[in-house]
Image (cartoon, helix red, strand yellow):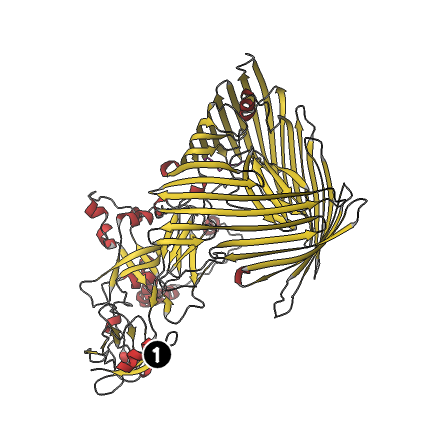
C-alpha cells in the first residue's frame, strides 16, 4: 500500500482488502461480460477508421441509378424510369457554376453531349484542355496535336477517376479530381486563362457641346458675344488582342476657324506573363517618381489590376461650384482635355475622357455673365505602398511631344518599385535625354502615424546654347492618414527644390525650345492639403488648400473651407474660398446653400423633388441669390430637369433679375442635355450630346459612352426593351442586342438582364452571366431565350382520355418541349403549329402519337399576339 501511495503521489489513499471469495466473484463477472464489453470496445474503433460518407458520394455515384415508386402518385401509374439517372439534361451549351473539390471556380459556358447508352434527353458535360486549365486542373500528359487539344471530352477521359455531377435545378456542376491534379489558388485570384480577350469590334465615343454667351454692359457701352462648339471623340478598334485608340477634340470659337487638338493615338496589348501592358504611340509616363512627360514612342509598364490584390492608379477628382449655367474646360500641359456645360450649383466631372498626360490640371469656369475663374487641380500620386515582394515597373522610350516646345528631344525613362516588407517599399528611377539627366530614389512606409512617401530627385542639364551645366535637387513628401476613432481623412503633399537649379525634363524641354518656361512657370515649392472631418452623423467639415511658389512669379494659392449640416427635412451648406493666380489676380467667394427635398413620406411622386437655394458674395462686391427646383422622371432618372430664378447685385449697381432652366435625357443610346439662362446683362444657352456607336460582327449598336473600359455586348433574341441591370438605363434593342458599359478589367463582372416587362411570347431561360474581361475588351454574352406563342394545352389520347402526368411533348427540333402536369395540362412555347408536328410520349404505356392540330388553333396563333392560347387537343 505504501508503494502504491508513492507511485500515485496521492496524499490521502483509502485501501480495501478483498477476500479470496470476493476476488473469484469478480473474475466470474468479467468472464461472463467480456464478449459484450469487447464488442462495444471494438465498435467505436471500427467507426473511427471507417471513411466518413460525404453527401456528394451519393450524387457522384453514377454506377447505380435511383428508382422511384410511382404508387405515391395519385391516379394512373406512370413510368418514372426517365428520372432514374437524375434530372434529364438536354444537349447543348449551358452556363453553370462550377465547383472543383468543393472549391468555387466561377461561372462557365459548358457544352453537354448526349449519352450513347442512356435514354434520349440525357447529356454529360465535356471539357476542352483550355477549360480545364481555367479551372485549375492539371492534365499530366496530352498529345499536343490540335485534334486532342481542341477536343471536348468527359472529365474521366482527361483525368483518371475524375467525376462530374450536374445539379440542373441550381445550375451547379460539381467536379471531383485527385488532389495532385488540382491547383489551389489564392483568395481573390483569377487565373489568366479566364481573362477574356473579347471580340473584334470598332467603336466611337462622341461628345458634342455647343455654348453661346452674350454679355451686355449695364451702362449700354457695348455687347460682347461668344459662341463655341466642340466635338470630342475616341475611336477604338479591338483586333486579335490589340487595342487601337485615337482620341481628339476639335473646337470652334466664333469668328475663328476650327482648331484641332489631336490628343493621343496608340496601340496596346497585354503582356500576360509579365502582368504588364505594352503600348506604342502617343502616351504619357506616370507621375509617381518624375513629373509626367507626354511623348510618342513605346511603353512597357506593369498593371497591378492583373494581380489578386490590385493597386488602382490615382485619378484626380474635379469638382466646383458654378454660380450660373457655366462652361467648364479642363486643360493639362497646354492641351484641352475636355469641355462640358454645367448648370448652376455644385458639379462633379468624372468622365472617361479625363486622365493621362500627367501634370497638374487647370480648370476654367466660364460663367454665363462673362466672369472667368481659373483653378489649378493638383495631380500628385498618393503615397504608394506595395505588398511584400511585389514588383512594379515602367520603361518609356520615345520623343517628347509637348504643346509649348519647339524642339522635341528623345528620352528614356525607367522606374522600379519593390515591396521590401508589408509596410515598406523602395523605388528608384532615371531619366536620360539629350543634355539632361535625372535620378530619383524614394521609399514609402505604412506606419501607425499614416502612409508616408519620401522621394529625392537630382537633375543635371547641359545648355546647348550657353555651354554650361546646372545641377539641382528636389524633395517630395506625401502623407495620408485616416483616423478611425474620429473618422478624419488627411492627405498632404510637399514638393520643394532644396538645392541648386533643379529642372524637370519638361522645363528643360521648354527652355531648350526657346520658350523659357512657357505656360508652366518653374515651381520652387508646391504644397497641397485636404482634410475631411465629420463632426456628427449629420455635420461635416472639409478643408482643402494648395500653394505654388514660382521663380520670378507671384505666389498662387487656393483655400477652401466647406461645411454641411443635415437636418430632418432640409440641409444647410457653406463654402468659403480664397484664391490668387500667379499673375496676382485675387478671387474671394462666400457661398451659402439650402437644400429642401420634397415628397418625403408621400406615396405620390411630386413633379419637383427638391429646392436648392444659394447665396454668394465675392470680393468685387457682387451678391448673387439663386433658387432652383429640380426633379426627375422615369426609371433610373431618365429625365432630369430644373428651373430657377436668380438675382444679382453688382457693387454700386442695380439689381439684375433673371431666369434659368436645364433639362437632360438619359437614354440607352446616349445622354442629351440643354440649358438656358437670361437676365438684363447676359443670355446663355447650351446643347450637349454624348454616347457611343459600336460596330461588331452582327451589326451596329448605339449606347452610352464607353471610354477605354471593357464592356459587354449582350444578345438576347426577341427580348426587345428588356432592361440591363446596372446599365444606367441601357436596354435590349430591336435586334436583340444591348451594351453594358464600365466593366472592371481582370475581375468577375455580373451581367444580367431584367425580364420584367417582356411579352408572354419571350421567356429568358438565362438572364445572368459572369465575364472576366481584359482591359478595353468587348465581351459578347449570349442569353438563352425561348420565343414563340405560349399555349396551354389540355391533351387527350385517341380514346379521349387525359394523358397521365409526366407524359412528354416533343418536336423534331425540341426533344424536351414540355411535360404533362395534372388534369392533362401542358404549357408549350417555341412551337409553330402551322409548320411543326407535335408529338407526345405516354408516361404509362410509353407509346408515341402525333397531336392533331385543327385550323382553329392556327388561326388563333395568327390573331393573338401577347396572350396565352388555351386549347384542347388529342392524338390523331
What is the span of residues highlighted in magenta in the rendered image? 384-390
Instruction: Where is residue 40? Give x, y as percent.
Output: 34, 64
Secondary element type, mark 1: strand
Instruction: Where is residue 42? Give x, y as percent.
Output: 32, 61
Give left or right: position of 62 versus 95: left
Quarter-of-image position of residue 716: bottom left
Instruction: Where is residue 650? Give x, y as percent.
Output: 77, 46
Give left or right: position of 411 versus 576: left
Considering depth in this image, is 464 or 66 the residue closer to the camera?
A: 464
Considering depth in this image, is 415 or 135 the residue closer to the camera?
A: 415
Relative to 433, does residue 215 appear above or below in the rendering?
Answer: below
Would you call the spot at circle 1 few (<14 residues within 10 Å), some (14-19), or many (20 or more)? some
Q: So how many labels did they put on this image? A: 1
Considering depth in this image, is 501 or 610 the residue closer to the camera?
A: 610
Considering depth in this image, is 334 or 462 the residue closer to the camera?
A: 334
Main SS, magenta region, reads loop
| Residue in the image at 55% along x and 44% along y | 229
Relative to 484, does residue 433 appear above or below in the rendering?
Answer: above
| Residue denoted by label 1 | 869
Relative to 666, does residue 414 appear above or below in the rendering?
Answer: above
Magenta segment includes 835: no
Q: Which quadrant does the C terminus fall into?
A: bottom left
| Residue in the image at 60% along x and 25% along y | 517
Quarter-of-image position of residue 872: bottom left
Magenta segment includes 385: yes
Q: Is residue 348 visible?
A: no
Give left or right: position of 409 versus 23: right
Q: Is residue 328 visible?
A: yes
Relative to 377, does residue 604 appear above or below in the rendering?
Answer: below
Instruction: Where is residue 867? Give x, y as percent.
Output: 39, 76
**Going by the picture, which residue comes out furthest to the right?**
652
Amino acid at each position: 500500500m505504501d508503494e502504491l501511495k508513492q507511485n500515485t503521489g496521492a496524499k490521502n489513499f483509502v485501501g480495501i482488502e478483498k477476500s479470496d471469495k470476493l476476488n473469484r466473484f469478480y473474475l466470474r463477472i468479467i468472464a461472463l461480460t467480456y464478449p459484450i464489453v469487447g464488442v462495444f470496445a471494438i465498435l467505436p474503433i471500427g467507426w473511427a477508421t471507417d471513411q466518413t460518407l460525404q453527401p456528394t458520394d451519393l450524387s457522384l455515384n453514377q454506377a447505380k441509378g435511383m428508382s422511384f415508386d410511382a404508387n405515391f402518385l395519385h391516379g394512373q401509374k406512370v413510368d418514372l424510369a426517365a428520372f432514374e439517372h437524375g434530372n434529364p439534361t438536354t444537349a447543348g451549351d449551358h452556363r453553370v457554376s462550377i465547383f472543383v473539390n468543393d472549391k468555387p471556380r466561377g461561372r462557365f459556358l459548358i457544352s453537354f453531349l448526349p449519352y450513347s447508352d442512356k435514354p434520349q434527353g440525357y447529356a454529360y458535360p465535356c471539357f476542352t484542355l483550355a477549360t480545364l486549365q481555367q479551372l485549375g486542373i492539371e492534365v499530366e500528359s496530352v498529345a499536343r496535336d490540335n485534334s486532342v487539344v481542341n477536343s471536348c471530352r468527359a472529365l474521366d477521359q482527361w483525368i483518371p477517376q475524375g467525376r462530374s455531377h450536374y445539379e440542373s435545378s441550381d445550375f451547379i456542376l460539381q467536379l471531383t479530381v485527385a488532389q495532385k491534379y488540382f491547383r489551389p489558388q489564392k483568395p481573390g485570384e483569377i487565373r489568366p486563362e479566364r481573362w477574356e480577350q473579347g471580340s473584334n469590334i470598332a467603336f466611337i465615343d462622341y461628345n458634342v457641346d455647343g455654348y453661346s454667351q452674350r454679355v451686355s454692359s449695364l451702362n449700354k457701352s457695348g455687347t460682347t458675344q461668344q459662341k463655341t462648339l466642340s466635338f470630342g471623340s475616341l475611336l477604338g478598334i479591338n483586333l486579335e488582342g490589340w487595342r487601337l485608340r485615337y482620341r481628339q477634340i476639335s473646337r470652334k470659337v466664333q469668328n475663328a476657324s476650327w482648331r484641332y487638338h489631336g490628343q493621343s493615338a496608340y496601340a496596346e496589348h497585354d503582356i500576360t506573363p509579365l502582368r504588364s501592358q505594352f503600348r506604342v504611340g502617343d502616351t504619357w509616363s506616370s507621375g509617381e517618381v518624375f513629373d509626367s512627360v507626354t511623348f510618342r514612342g513605346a511603353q512597357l509598364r506593369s498593371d497591378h489590376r492583373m494581380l489578386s490584390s490590385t493597386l488602382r492608379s490615382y485619378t484626380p477628382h474635379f469638382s466646383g461650384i458654378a454660380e450660373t449655367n457655366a462652361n467648364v474646360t479642363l486643360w493639362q500641359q497646354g492641351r484641352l482635355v475636355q469641355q462640358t456645360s454645367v448648370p448652376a450649383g455644385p458639379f462633379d466631372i468624372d468622365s472617361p475622357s479625363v486622365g493621362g498626360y500627367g501634370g497638374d490640371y487647370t480648370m476654367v469656369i466660364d460663367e454665363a455673365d462673362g466672369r472667368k475663374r481659373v483653378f489649378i487641380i493638383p495631380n500628385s500620386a498618393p503615397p504608394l505602398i506595395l505588398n511584400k515582394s511585389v514588383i512594379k515597373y515602367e520603361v518609356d522610350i520615345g520623343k517628347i511631344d509637348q504643346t509649348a516646345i519647339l524642339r522635341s528631344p528623345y528620352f528614356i525613362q525607367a522606374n522600379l518599385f519593390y515591396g521590401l516588407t508589408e509596410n515598406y517599399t523602395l523605388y528608384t528611377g532615371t531619366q536620360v535625354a539629350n543634355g539632361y539627366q535625372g535620378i530619383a530614389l524614394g521609399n514609402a512606409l505604412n506606419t501607425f502615424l499614416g502612409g508616408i512617401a519620401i522621394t529625392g530627385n537630382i537633375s543635371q542639364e547641359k545648355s546647348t546654347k550657353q555651354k554650361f551645366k546646372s545641377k539641382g535637387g528636389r524633395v517630395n513628401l506625401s502623407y495620408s492618414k485616416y483616423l478611425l476613432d474620429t473618422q478624419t481623412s488627411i492627405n498632404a503633399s510637399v514638393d520643394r527644390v532644396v538645392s541648386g537649379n533643379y529642372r524637370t525634363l519638361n522645363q528643360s524641354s521648354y527652355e531648350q525650345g526657346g520658350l523659357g518656361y512657357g505656360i508652366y512657370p518653374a515651381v520652387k515649392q508646391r504644397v497641397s492639403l485636404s482634410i475631411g472631418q465629420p463632426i456628427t452623423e449629420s455635420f461635416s467639415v472639409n478643408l482643402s488648400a494648395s500653394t505654388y511658389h514660382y521663380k520670378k512669379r507671384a505666389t498662387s494659392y487656393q483655400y477652401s473651407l466647406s461645411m454641411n449640416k443635415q437636418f430632418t427635412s432640409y440641409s444647410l451648406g457653406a463654402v468659403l474660398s480664397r484664391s490668387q493666380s500667379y499673375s496676382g489676380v485675387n478671387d474671394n467667394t462666400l457661398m451659402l446653400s439650402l437644400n429642401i427635398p420634397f415628397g418625403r413620406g408621400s406615396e405620390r411622386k411630386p413633379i419637383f423633388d427638391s429646392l436648392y437655394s444659394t447665396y454668394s458674395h465675392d470680393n468685387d462686391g457682387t451678391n448673387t441669390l439663386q433658387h432652383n427646383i429640380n426633379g426627375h422622371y422615369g426609371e433610373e432618372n431618365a429625365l432630369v430637369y430644373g428651373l430657377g430664378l436668380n438675382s444679382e447685385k453688382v457693387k454700386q449697381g442695380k439689381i439684375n433679375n433673371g431666369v434659368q432652366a436645364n433639362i437632360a435625357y438619359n437614354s440607352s443610346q446616349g445622354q442629351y442635355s440643354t440649358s438656358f439662362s437670361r437676365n438684363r446683362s447676359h443670355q446663355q444657352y447650351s446643347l450637349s450630346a454624348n454616347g457611343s456607336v459600336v460596330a461588331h460582327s452582327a451589326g451596329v449598336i448605339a449606347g452610352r459612352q464607353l471610354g477605354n473600359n471593357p464592356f459587354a455586348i449582350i444578345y438576347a433574341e426577341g427580348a426587345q426593351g428588356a432592361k440591363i441591370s446596372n446599365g444606367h438605363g441601357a436596354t435590349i434593342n430591336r435586334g436583340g442586342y444591348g451594351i453594358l458599359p464600365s466593366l472592371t478589367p481582370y475581375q468577375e463582372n455580373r451581367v444580367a438582364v431584367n425580364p420584367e416587362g417582356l411579352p408572354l411570347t419571350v421567356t429568358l431561360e438565362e438572364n445572368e452571366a459572369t465575364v472576366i474581361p481584359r482591359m478595353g475588351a468587348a465581351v459578347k454574352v449570349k442569353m438563352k431565350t425561348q420565343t414563340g406563342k405560349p399555349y396551354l394545352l389540355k391533351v387527350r389520347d385517341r380514346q379521349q382520355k387525359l394523358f397521365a402526368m409526366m407524359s412528354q411533348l416533343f418536336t423534331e427540333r425540341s426533344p424536351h418541349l414540355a411535360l404533362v402536369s395534372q388534369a392533362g395540362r401542358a404549357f408549350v412555347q417555341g412551337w409553330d403549329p402551322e409548320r411543326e408536328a407535335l408529338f407526345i410520349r405516354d408516361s404509362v404505356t410509353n407509346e408515341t402519337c402525333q397531336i392533331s392540330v385543327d385550323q382553329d388553333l392556327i388561326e388563333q396563333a395568327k390573331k393573338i399576339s401577347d396572350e396565352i392560347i388555351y386549347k384542347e387537343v388529342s392524338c390523331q
